[in-house]
Image: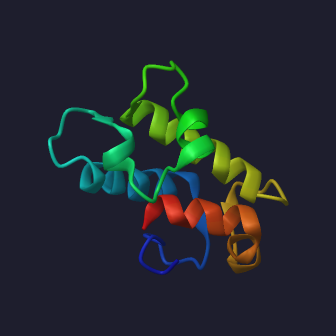
Amino acid sequence: MQAFDINKNGKLELAEVKSAAAARFDELNPDQDDSLDAREAGSVLQGNVFRRADTDGDGTVNKAEYLAYVEQMFELADTDKDGSLDRTELDAEAGRALLMLLR
């Protein structure tokens, strides 16, 4: 969490999460073609997760789709709906799933 907590307030806000997710997308996309196929997505987006993120059904996940999926996962993890994720929320199942998209 500390690596993504840009403002060092002990919580992750959506902007921090999306910034980390954008950087992770770029790492996963060595050909820089603005989309991840299943091979590039590797262990980050597998099976049903890849299909859920691929909202246009073209067999790839572009950066906008990836960031939209990350935002959905953020909202799911934000159980108290305060717009930030604390350690308790990140340690829960949805929070752990979100962190996997960032690492």
Question: x and y percent of residue 98 in the render?
Answer: 59, 60
Give the quarter of the image for residue 23. Answer: bottom left
Q: Residue furthest right?
A: 80
* Vertical arrangement, residue 22 with respect to residue 8, above or below: above
Q: Coloured how?
A: rainbow
Task: Looking at the picture, tell me which residue is in the foreground, 21 or 52.
Answer: 52
Number of residue marks: 0
Q: Residue at 43% x, 31% y: name it.
A: 64
Q: Residue at 52% x, 41% y: name it.
A: 50
Quadrant of the frame with the C terminus: bottom left
| 23 on left or right of 78 | left
* Vertical arrangement, residue 60 with respect to residue 70, above or below: above
Question: x and y percent of residue 95 in the render?
Answer: 68, 66
Task: Looking at the picture, tell me which residue is in the foreground, 2 or 94.
Answer: 94
Q: Residue at 75% x, 51% y: name it.
A: 76
Question: x and y percent of residue 77 in the render?
Answer: 73, 58
| 91 on left or right of 6 | right
* Vertical arrangement, residue 53 with respect to residue 1, above or below: above
Question: x and y percent of residue 30 in the render?
Answer: 17, 49
| 71 on left or right of 93 | left
Give the quarter of the image for residue 96. Answer: bottom right
Q: Residue at 69% x, 79% y: name it.
A: 87
